[in-house]
């Protein structure tokens, strides 16, 4: 194709409208500062939980969330910090080695019940329960691992029938919450 | 006129054949390509034209244009010109963009300092839970380099147009660049790099060693993470009535107050900042 003198160029190419300017890719140090406001405690007055300790957890050798023992709550630390975009996951047992777990009565939560998360910077982040759902353990909803969208919280425990042959419950119960 | 601009005045030819050779194999239909164009030549603003018409103008160093909507199309007589002039910096000919896959095209200086275009295909394979991917690409007018992570060699002998990549535990890595086989001088960095779960961080070394304009650009590809396999939160029966509530109860509650749940968005796949 022959070169068209600039003065004769009618205007932007018909293709131009398809191009989206995404802005600068220049290295910006502040984008690489990891500020962690990790959850350290959980209060749920409606369930009589005055304060449960929250521990950061990852995954175990089998790729499952490494939930702590009966008395503590695990924060899935590879997901968002509370207040960051996406869904913060807090998981605790309904029962563990014969003891009631912290989330023994999680299913008793009702919409608008308040959940307060204590953060490592000393602040308190209140949430309001929006609903509960129950899922087979192998069919957890993808929303549970969301990394974008409004900041929100999920409290996860077990429910459904206890399968004695496998030594575990069939389902997960999830209480969903948004900042109050 | 700076040395870079002088070089830009010299036309750098890039054949369409070479370009096509770097494109990913054409997959089936359903194109869902992600194609970004990065400006990696410091100190010069350019206009990009196709078929004699402006594709976009005033494209500045470090900026990114998303060409994904043009996937699979042929840009005829693609030219990169010094902004507002007829000085052709890169004469690319007819360029057919990949119609699938995840790619970054970067306008950069080759090892000799000649402006050129390079196409990198981004690895979008799944990353294990708790890890992020770090990819370092040499797109600067400079000899082979070693890339140090926290002071230790991570990628050795990386030449212009090549890359090194590794999946690392989440956290912060201090990255720096030194001449291959040496520990100093540090020509880029040290710079903190955030390794985030399920995210690929791509770092481009750009600019010119001779012009003392070496610096880095960054790009991220998100949504590559692996969700945990399960959440086991009950290894013994609860004391009474086995969790004592029915799914019907749950369903009813969800209907009443499920808006927040229904509004939840799925994990973005290969979404880029």
Image (cartoon, coloured by chain):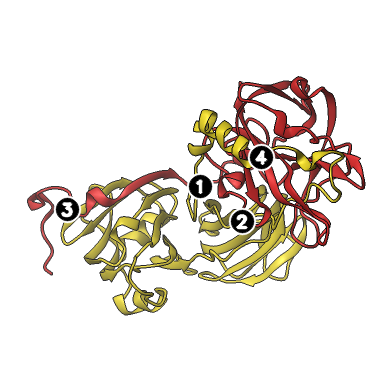
Chain colours: A red, B yellow
For discs 3 and 1, the disc positioned in front in the rendered view: 1
Element type at mark 2: loop
> Which residue is the site of mark 4?
B246
Residue B37, percent from left and from top: 39, 56
Q: Are marks 4 and 1 on the same chain?
A: yes
If the image is split into quadrants, where does the N terminus of chain A sit?
bottom left
Q: CA distance from mark 3 to mark 1?
A: 33 Å
For discs 1 and 2, the disc positioned in front in the rendered view: 1
> Which residue is the site of mark 2?
B225
Residue drawn 68% across and 53% down?
A137
Farthest-out residue, right:
A98
Q: CA distance from mark 4 to mark 3?
A: 58 Å
Say whether disc 1 or disc 2 marks the residue closer to the N-terminus. 2
Q: Tell me whether circle 2 and circle 4 mark residues in contact (CB < 8 Å).
A: no
Q: Are marks 3 and 1 on the same chain?
A: no
- What chain letter is assigned to the residue under label 2? B
> Which residue is the site of mark 1?
B266
For discs 4 and 3, the disc positioned in front in the rendered view: 4
Say whether disc 4 or disc 1 marks the residue closer to the N-terminus. 4
| Mark sitting on residue A14 | 3
Q: In the visual, does A41 lie left or right of B148?
A: right
If the image is split into quadrants, where does the C terminus of chain A sit?
top right
Residue drawn 36% across and 74% down?
B28
Residue B72, percent from left and from top: 29, 67
Q: Tell me whether circle 4 and circle 1 mark residues in contact (CB < 8 Å).
A: no
């Amino acid at each position: 194709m022959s070169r068209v003198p600039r003065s004769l160029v009618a205007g932007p190419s018909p293709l131009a409208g398809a191009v989206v300017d995404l802005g600068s890719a220049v290295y910006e140090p502040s984008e690489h500062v990891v500020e962690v406001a990790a959850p350290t405690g959980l209060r749920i007055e409606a369930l009589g939980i005055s304060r449960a300790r929250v521990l950061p957890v990852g995954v175990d050798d089998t790729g499952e969330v490494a939930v702590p023992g009966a008395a503590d709550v695990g924060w899935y630390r590879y997901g968002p910090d509370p207040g960051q975009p996406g869904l913060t996951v807090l998981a605790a047992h309904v029962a563990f080695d014969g003891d009631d777990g912290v989330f023994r009565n999680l299913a008793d939560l009702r919409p608008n019940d308040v959940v307060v998360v204590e953060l490592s910077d000393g602040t308190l982040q209140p949430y309001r329960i929006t609903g509960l759902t129950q899922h087979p353990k192998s069919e957890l909803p993808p929303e549970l691992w969301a990394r974008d969208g409004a900041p929100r919280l999920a409290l996860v425990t077990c429910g459904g029938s206890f399968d004695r042959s496998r030594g575990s419950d069939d389902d997960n119960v999830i209480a969903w919450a948004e900042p109050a | 006129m700076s040395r870079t601009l002088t070089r830009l005045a010299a036309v750098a030819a890039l054949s369409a054949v070479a370009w096509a050779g770097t494109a990913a194999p054409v997959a089936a239909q359903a194109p869902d390509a992600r194609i970004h164009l990065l400006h990696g030549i410091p100190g010069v603003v350019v206009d990009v034209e196709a078929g004699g018409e402006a594709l976009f103008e005033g494209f500045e160093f470090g900026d990114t244009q998303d060409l994904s909507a043009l996937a699979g199309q042929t840009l005829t007589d693609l030219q990169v010109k010094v902004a507002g002039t007829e000085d052709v910096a890169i004469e690319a000919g007819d360029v057919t963009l990949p119609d699938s896959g995840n790619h970054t095209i970067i306008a950069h200086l080759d090892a000799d300092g000649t402006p050129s275009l390079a196409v990198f295909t981004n690895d979008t394979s799944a990353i294990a839970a708790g890890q992020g991917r770090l990819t370092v690409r040499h797109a600067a007018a400079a000899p082979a380099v070693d890339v140090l992570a926290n002071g230790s060699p991570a990628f050795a002998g990386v030449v212009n147009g090549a890359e090194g990549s590794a999946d690392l535990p989440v956290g912060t890595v201090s990255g720096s660049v030194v001449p291959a086989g040496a520990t100093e001088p540090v020509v880029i960095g040290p710079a903190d790099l955030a390794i985030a779960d399920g995210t690929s961080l791509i770092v481009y070394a750009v600019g010119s060693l001779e012009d003392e304009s070496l610096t880095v650009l960054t790009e991220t590809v998100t949504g590559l993470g692996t969700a945990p396999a399960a959440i086991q939160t009950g290894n013994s029966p609860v004391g009474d009535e086995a969790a004592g509530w029915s799914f019907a109860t749950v369903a009813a509650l969800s209907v009443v107050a499920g808006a927040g749940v229904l509004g939840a968005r799925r994990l973005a796949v290969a979404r880029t900042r």
